[in-house]
Amino acid sequence: MAITRSELARKAGSSTDSKMNDNIDATVPSKAAMEQAMGSRFALGDIGNIGAKVSSLTLDPLKKNGAIKKEILGQQPAITRQKTITRRALAQAVTMAPPAAPAVTAATSLSSLSTSVKATALKTEVYCDFKEPAVIVEPVPASVMPVAPMDISEDRADAFSRALVPVEDIDANDHDNPQLVSEYVCDIYDYMHQMEKRLFVRHHYLDGADITGKMRSILVDWLCQVHHRFHLLQETLYLTVAIIDRYLQEKPVIRNKLQLVGVTAMLLASKYEEMFAPEVADFVYITDNAYSKADIREMERDILRTLNFSFGKPLCLHFLRRNSKAGQVDATKHTLAKYMMELTITEYDMVHLPPSQIAAAALYLSIKLLDNSPWTETLAYYSTYSEDHLQPLATKLAGLVHKAETSKLTAIRTKYSTSKLMKISQIPELKSPLITELAGQAS
């Protein structure tokens, strides 16, 4: 059969199109092959979590660790997105990087466009359902009980008794002043009470020695005049007397060395308390050259060795300041108590008494003489002495005040008759019937 030229050309074109389409199919992989090589584009669909509804947060009270669990109520079938694209668009997606989304052309069928729109709507719905609702977390009791704060309160024997009596905290308003050390001032005074018991002076320690108690009283009265002339601190005078008594009870000296012990003790006390202590030459002059500088230095070394460099014995003045603060006393009561305390340093029969007891008894008598106010629970707590405990010593102090009017040892009474010390030794209360009555009981 004869074939015309037009038919031959039409067959040749059809064969060429068929070969071209076969080449395109050969270069474009199948959909299964693409998914196997690249993996699914919808990972959430593969693990089956798309569309799963998450319940509200639940807490298991049986478990102590308070773990949080999420319960999956149900699984919904995975929804994948399907599109119908042409071979030419698929070939373009494979060869180009990154692959571009195929544009909707006139060649795209109406059914494929409808399928794409539905898949997009379903995907949006899946993502909206996947959002977790608002979670309200309720606290679960922890397995370990919370640790209580460290207790730094005072653990002393008087803690319970202090809670029962109306004792005022006299250090409550001192927290802003670091010099008052309100955090541990009570511990400091507890330590001072222990030190006064350890560094005590024996009663009648001069018995059998060459020096008598009267000689000691004359020396102390003279040292009060030297102290006043050198304008030294009050602590220096009390520490001087304490050094003399502690040294003499350990190493008694002969009579002609007693004054040397006194001036050397004041030199040591000045070095301990004063910012600018007097020089050795000043004490040589005050003794009218009875002793040389070498004598004073040698006695200084001997006192230091005998007392083992220990000069931390508490003084009456330390305790009086604490008691005056506890009693909220005025300057007159405080100065009168100082006068009575200083009268005791010349008395040999009172060297064995604790400084804290002397300070408490002096303030107790001062309060009774001026306004007869009560010895409060706060005063009893901070002084550690009750009113019954102080009454016997208060009668002895009243006897000293009564005897000071006619005594030959006038240095202390003269010093407290000056205006600087409010002329406290001349107030009429010191000649009241109460002083006379108490002095009669002491004798």
Image (cartoon, helix red, strand yellow):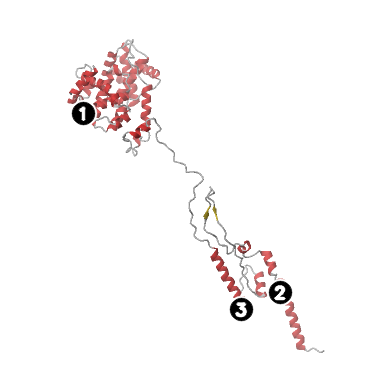
- Residue 114 in sight here: yes
Q: Does residue 78 sit above or below 362 in this rendering? A: below
Q: Does residue 15 sit above or below 331 in this rendering? A: below
Distance, label 3 to label 2, CA atoms, is 24 Å
Taking depth in this image into account, of 155 and 300 the one nearest to the observer is: 155
Task: Give the image location of residue 416, x and y in percent.
Answer: 22, 24
Tell me the tag on residue 370: 1
In this rendering, position of residue 18 left or right of residue 324? right
Tell me the tag on residue 53: none
The C terminus lies in quadrant: top left
Identity, as a three-letter code, of the amino acid under mark 3? Leu
Q: Give yes or no for contact between labels 3 and 1 (Cβ–Cβ under 8 Å).
A: no
Identity, as a three-letter code, of the amino acid under mark 1? Leu
Tell me where residue 190 sits by quadrant.
top left
Neighbour tally class for label 3: few under 14, some 14-19, many 20 plus, Cα within 10 Å? few
Identity, as a three-letter code, of the amino acid under mark 2? Ile
Which numbered disc, 1 or 2, marks the residue that appears first in the sequence?
A: 2
Which numbered disc, 3 or 1, marks the residue that appears first in the sequence?
A: 3
As helix, strand or loop, the secondary structure at mark 2 comes to helix
Task: Give the image location of residue 129, x and y in percent.
Answer: 54, 65
